[in-house]
Amino acid sequence: MFGFTSKQLSGVAIFLFAIFIGVPLLIGLTGRWDFYFTLTSVALLAIASAGVWLTFYIGRINIGQGAFALIGAYVSAILVVKVGWSFWISLPAAGLFAALVAVLIGLPILRLRGVYFAMITLVLTQVVTLTALALPITNGAKGISNIPLPSGVSIFGIPLLPDFAGMENTKLAFYYTACILMIITYATLYRLVNSRLGHLCRSMQQNEELASSIGVNISYIRIVIFAISSFFGGIGGAMFGSIAQSVYPSSFQVADSVNFMLNCFLGGLGFVFGPMLGTLVLYFGWDLLFEFGKYQMLIYSTVLILIIRFLPNGLLSIRFGKGGDK
Amino acid sequence: MEQILANGVYLGSQYAMIALGLTLIFALMNVLNFAHGQMYVIGGFVTYTFYGQWGVPFILALVMSCVTLAILGALIERFLFAPVIKGSAREESTMLLAAGIAFFLDAVILLFFGEKQRGVPKIVDGVFNYDFRLIMPYDRILICVLAILSIVAFIGLMQYTKTGRALRALAQDRTAAQLMGVNVDRYSMIGFALGAMLAGLVGGLLVTITGVNLGMGGPTSIKAFMMVMIGGAGVISGAIWGGIILGFMEAIGLALLYQYGDITYLLIFVSLMIFLAIRPQGLMGKPWG
Amino acid sequence: MQRRTLMKAALTAVSLIALQATSALAENPVLKIGFVGVTSGPAASWGISNQRSMETRAAWINETGGYEIGDTTYDIEIVSFDDQKDPKRAIAGMEKMAQEGIHYVVGPNVDDGAAAVRPVAESNGIMYFPYAFPKSLYEAPASNAVLGMVANYQSGPAIYKYLMEEKGVKTVAFIAANESDPLSQRDGGVAAATALGLEVVSDNVTYQVDTTDFTPVLTPVMRSRPDLLVLSGVSPANAPQLIRSARELGFQGVISTETAQDSGVLTEGAGDLANGFISVGGASTPELASPMMNEFVDRYTKMFGEYNDESNTKVYALEYILETLKADPTALTDVDAFQATMDTFEAPNPYMNGDATLRYVGMSSFGQKRQVAVPLVVNVYQDGKFETLFVAEVD
């Protein structure tokens, strides 16, 4: 089927079973309802991290994903609160707007490489935060709060999506939504990496001049990849705004941009599913260390240092020597 | 106008010193040291403890800051960065290590020195006031002079000593330096220690003016990154220019754009982005990065 | 004879059981109170002073046998969660509190966190006591947030009015960090000052949160020559440097802020230059502090090595929660009962001399009682410590 081996297919099946049935079952058994939000966060942050990973794939260190997540969150919030759109339409709109911004900004800055690109994207995060503070449409420092929950969608009276506000357990609904989005994201990512575009990206990662000389339109590919990457960021951010029902200029900031990048490093840059695992370990790990009180940060950072010291190519490098699949 | 110039020189000299250490480490090992700001904060706290708490003479406290950070830097390089660089497929992976170290140092600072803002007694009292057109407290003038002297000393070290020559060779071409008989491992460690020491020195100097608190680390790193980018990554003179330019940009921006309040920094950042987009390697950097 | 031994045995048995009962009594059931706030990173000092106040008070209660609510005596346990000043983490923290079965939480410390946790708190039946000022948090339809301190739009006018009458202040300048909380507080301050008839000569100068040198920032403000310089929402770390820079630039007027400060930090950072600096504090100045406040400060100092004056305003939230639960034990699990009790609740304020009371206020600001009545103590810094300037009430 689609050229997948049966081993890969069964892996995917197990994964899907685990997140859609296994996790809710486990949470129901143990009663740890708080894990729903943590895992929802992991799924959404993993979507944004997937974008960062994609820019790594063309050899760019992206520390600007927080900027696009914030743009996405604001676009969705403004469309829902001020224009009165349904959240479900505002979600792709947020992604598209983030992608549009990425194209405009990417045109000049994608010529930069290495640490220069990293730094300019870092500055970009601050620029977006400061812009959100200064603009009237974003409500400046006061942020946008009291955002309504996603409303239901129905076509010809058949409900496609339920109304979140009327729901008993929005946690579960948000969890499923985030997981579905995450799976779509990573399926897209996997497809992309194994397409012609993916091969071109790999050639660019190795040597841009060489790729260019054999007729690859590198500036076009760079823009496309950066736009897709930012689209993911925008989606993740918009979804978060909807869960928190509020957006502030500080909802996504430099620390978030850095974390998105670290997720990719930790999971492993050579693996499509690296950022997902990286996000899980980094974000969930912090929550698990909650018991240690004031030593939480110390233990967290020590573990982080040890991981990178002994697995410098990311967590996934333990089992899979090389290759891009799970 | 005089005030703007004076503020610019003062800000620029301290910024340049912060950027120097960062760029040195970057030039030698291609490591973007996210923990640079935390090292600066530790330097400040060491001087605070010796000078502010125990009453040790200021200069001695400053030396203690330098020594502590040099040792810390050497250990970090020897046991963390060197093995990770050897083992990783893409050298950017060191960013994760650097960030981990930054978190770790933050946690250590919190446990050892607490969450409060700390300050030390003024080293010199009094304010230089020229007809209200130029106002500069004497301790700032002194710190500014000390900073400039340290920068000159550092340049001297890099230019005229054996260590300096070895470090420069290493920065230019690692393989060639090795072939020429430079002990790469040893000088990497020395270079990293030197970079960390510079951070400690600035921290110790500035604690007399700005005080120190554990929150200063991260933002200081980011500011240092920007200076390094302006001047060109991995170039010593670039870092100095970057520091001075950012210092002047802030001094001028704050003086001229104050009535726009909230957007002063926005403009500074945007112009920085435009500048880098036009000149991707900074003022004097290598075209790679 | 035999009866005697029997009696003896019975007595021993009874006393043994009684002994066991007392030892069982010492093992009180535990009442968990939550804290969600920032205790690491740049803003750590806000949350840490908060968390430590709560831990000090809890340890104190437990040491003296526990806290009686209804017929049961409880040991108090503080469950704290570090949200790293990130609204996303704050939500996770609130979820964790719900998981632990906690219904009363102190925090978060900042605007965005307080707004972000609202859905979780309301759907899980958690009352929370943020240290954030946006009115939308406390006005209906919001129901579960209780402002844990005096808001700047309440303390600001009181301070400005006092200074207008006592010091003849006519013009005022505002300066704030370029961040949500301080900017909102600045806007509130400007509105209050204008309403009082003060002339606002400068209100648009801001500084980056990470600024270390305030001379260039303050130079244009000083040129407008205000009588009063207000540091809106200033963090304890920045206050001494701002004061120092302003004084070194030759500023002669009054400097004030509406946030709580620490005298030790001011002494180290600005020394005598900070004399005359006006800030909002709690009841720990010698004139006001009750014996209980003094003991609290002692215990805090013993537990953590050093007291933090910011804690003066942060000692109250936990006390309010416990006192209100005592007034209505059904509120232990029923937040609606708590909200109903809030309307009529009243108890003596143990931390302040005189006949001050603990009660809920906020009708005039929020239209419902969603604020703790903390005495509005305005302090002035003089030679290393705070002195009380005046005390006012919030309604």
Image: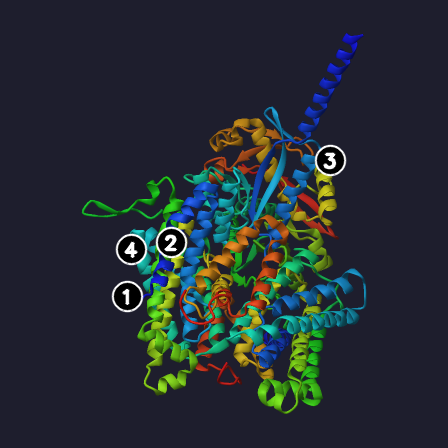
The amino acid marked with disc number 4 is: Ile
Asked if the residues shown at circle 3 and circle 4 are in contact, with their CB atoms under 8 angstroms apart, the answer is no
Classify 10 Å Cα crowding around label 4: few (below 14), some (14-19), many (20 and above).
Answer: few
The quarter of the rendered structure image containing the C terminus of chain C is top right
- Expressed as whole percent of the image width and height from the top left, the position of residue B243 reads 59, 77
Q: Earlier in the sequence, mark 2 or mark 4?
A: 4
Q: Which residue is mark 4?
A: A89
Viewer-proximal residue among C293 and C375: C293
Indicate which label's residue lies in the foreground, 2 or 3. Answer: 2
- Expressed as whole percent of the image width and height from the top left, the position of residue C226 reads 59, 58
Indicate which label's residue lies in the foreground, 4 or 1. Answer: 1
Name the residue located 58 percent from the left edge and 67 percent from the top edge.
A310
What secondary structure is found at the residue carrying circle 1?
loop
Do the residues indicated by labels 3 and 4 lie within the same chain of the protein?
no
Viewer-proximal residue among C219 and C100: C100
- Expressed as whole percent of the image width and height from the top left, the position of residue C164 reads 59, 48
Do the residues indicated by labels 2 and 1 lie within the same chain of the protein?
yes
Q: Which residue is mark 2?
A: A178
What secondary structure is found at the residue carrying circle 4?
helix
Above or below, C205 relative to C100? below
The amino acid marked with disc number 2 is: Ala
Q: Chain of mark 4?
A: A
Spatial CA distance of label 2 from label 3 is 54 Å
What secondary structure is found at the residue carrying circle 3?
helix
